[in-house]
């Protein structure tokens, strides 16, 4: 992708993401869109409060505000990196910080929102984290030894995408990320083992095929099969140990069965498979997991109804469940990008696969209208579309940096033939 095309794509992705953040910041909560429109027309529901006046601390809200602006920082950093000089980077970072400030100032005039300096501080911290993480991650990835038989250009995008897949899945498995070492809580988390085993087939399938996709991602990171198997076992052990230390119950017989099934199939069939086959089947594995998640009865947590909402509903309730929901569909988008990068696909193929994934999710959401206890909207499709574009552009940036490093290292002094005196 040429520099100009990449700048346009990054600017578009950043604008879309900030528009999504603005929608969640200004239209979420109990206030209806109609009330929000009335406010925009000059008829606010209440008088504007003092901006940035609220200072109470909520761990869940702080975490959600931090994470929400990390992608914005990543995209801004990638866009600024296409220019020379430090001034562009400073301006890009300040633009994200000022955008967050404008959201907080606008919330001072919304009936069901509060303008908080803590929210602004966490938003700014998230943007800073994303801004700093991109160059650090790129530098680290290029120092890691690549897989045998691959150039640095091919290894960097694949490695970056694989880490995104594994990291996001672990984040989903360990939500809501509040850990404790209290013995009583740990025993309560494991108390289900003393009860009679009961299994939800939808939940089993979601975790089984999800862990299969994670096993493929680990295979992309670790070339030797024995080490890839050990990495899968270690990742599962880490997820289970973290879930046992959560402040409330997360483990169940269904999840254990899904992990056991996914690990067994992965160790026997997937880890020994050839790279080309894995790149082709990993999207199907992730899609089956998403099918089980989407079609399970009564899985949604913020509302029910038979009508389809073209407005995204994610984030209209508590931020932590919304964040977990968004991370799961980001994981699905990252799996698609991993498959494409691993297969060496071009942008046209990526656009085709991404479009098919978005249409498939829309079809699943429409199908939820007939499922009891589910709510149907465009949230999954929009999250996947945005996460797919962001991951594709960021992995493209990783590949370009790898190419630059390879070229710089390959420069050798010109050997001139000796002249006869």
Image (tube, grey):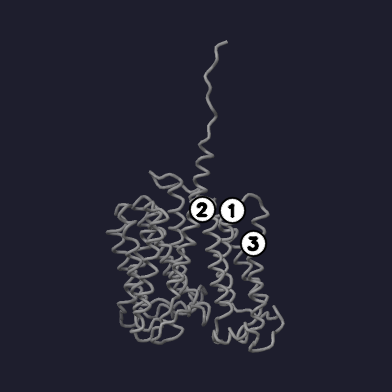
Q: CA distance from mark 1 to mark 2?
A: 9 Å
Circle 2 — which element?
helix
Return the disc, 1 or 2, that comes first in the chain's sequence. Answer: 1
**What whole-number distance in Å separates the C-alpha atoms at marks 1 and 3?**
12 Å
Q: Mark 1, residues whose alpha carbon is within 10 Å: few (<14), some, or many (≥20)?
A: some
- CA neighbours of label 2 inside 10 A, class few (<14), some (14 to 19), many (20+): many
Left or right for 42, reference 159: right
Q: Are marks 1 and 2 in contact (CB under 8 Å)?
A: yes
User: At which x and y percent is residue 28?
Assistant: 55, 81
Residue at (69%, 85%) from the top-left corner? 48
Q: Residue 26: horizontal and vertical position, in percent?
A: 59, 79
* Side (left or right) of 115 relative to 312: right
Q: How many marks?
A: 3
Q: Which quarter of the rendered picture does the C terminus lie within?
A: top right
Which mark, residue 397? 2
Q: Secondary structure at mark 3?
A: helix
Q: Quadrant of residue 289?
A: bottom left
- In primary-sequence order, the first of circles 1 and 3 is 1
Any mark on residue 365, and which? none
Question: Which circle marks residue 93 in the picture?
Answer: 3
Estimate the x, y position of residue 250 in percent, counting from the top left: 43, 77
| Residue at 57% over, 58% down | 133
Q: Is residue 227 above or below residue 252?
A: above
- Secondary element under disc 1, as helix, strand or loop, is helix
Q: Which residue is mark 1?
A: 81
């Amino acid at each position: 992708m040429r520099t100009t095309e990449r700048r346009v794509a990054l600017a578009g992705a950043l604008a879309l993401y900030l528009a999504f953040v603005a929608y969640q910041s200004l239209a979420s909560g109990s206030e209806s869109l109609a009330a929000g429109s009335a406010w925009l027309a000059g008829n606010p529901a209440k008088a504007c409060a003092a901006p940035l006046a609220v200072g109470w601390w909520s761990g869940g809200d702080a975490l959600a505000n931090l994470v929400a602006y990390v992608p914005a920082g990543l995209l801004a950093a990638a866009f600024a990196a296409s220019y020379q000089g430090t001034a562009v980077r400073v301006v890009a970072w300040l633009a994200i910080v000022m955008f967050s400030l404008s959201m907080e100032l606008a919330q001072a005039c919304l009936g069901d929102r509060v303008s908080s300096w803590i929210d602004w501080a966490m938003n700014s911290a998230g943007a800073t984290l994303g801004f700093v993480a991109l160059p650090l991650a790129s530098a680290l990835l290029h120092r890691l030894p690549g897989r045998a038989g691959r150039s640095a250009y091919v290894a960097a995008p694949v490695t970056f995408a694989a880490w995104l897949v594994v990291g996001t899945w672990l984040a989903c498995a360990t939500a809501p990320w509040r850990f404790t070492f209290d013995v009583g809580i740990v025993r309560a988390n494991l108390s289900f083992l003393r009860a009679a085993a009961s299994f939800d087939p939808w939940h089993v399938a979601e975790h089984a095929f999800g862990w299969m996709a994670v096993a493929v991602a680990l295979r992309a990171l670790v070339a030797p099969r024995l080490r890839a198997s050990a990495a899968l076992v270690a990742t599962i052990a880490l997820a289970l140990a973290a879930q046992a230390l959560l402040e409330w119950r997360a483990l169940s017989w269904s999840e254990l069965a899904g992990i056991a099934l996914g690990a067994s199939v992965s160790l026997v069939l997937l880890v020994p498979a050839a790279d080309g086959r894995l790149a082709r089947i990993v999207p199907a594995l992730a899609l089956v997991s998403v099918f089980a998640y989407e079609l399970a009865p009564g899985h949604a947590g913020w509302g029910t109804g038979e009508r389809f909402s073209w407005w995204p509903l994610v984030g209209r309730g508590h931020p932590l469940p919304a964040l977990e929901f968004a991370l799961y569909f980001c994981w699905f988008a990252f799996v698609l990008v991993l498959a494409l990068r691993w297969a060496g696909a071009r942008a046209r193929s990526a656009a085709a696969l991404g479009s098919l994934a978005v249409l498939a999710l829309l079809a699943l959401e429409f199908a939820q209208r007939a499922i009891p206890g589910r709510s149907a909207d465009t949230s999954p499709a929009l999250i996947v579309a945005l996460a797919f574009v962001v991951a594709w552009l960021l992995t493209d940036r990783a590949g370009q940096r790898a190419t630059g490093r390879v070229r710089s290292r390959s420069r050798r002094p010109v050997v001139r033939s000796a002249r006869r005196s």
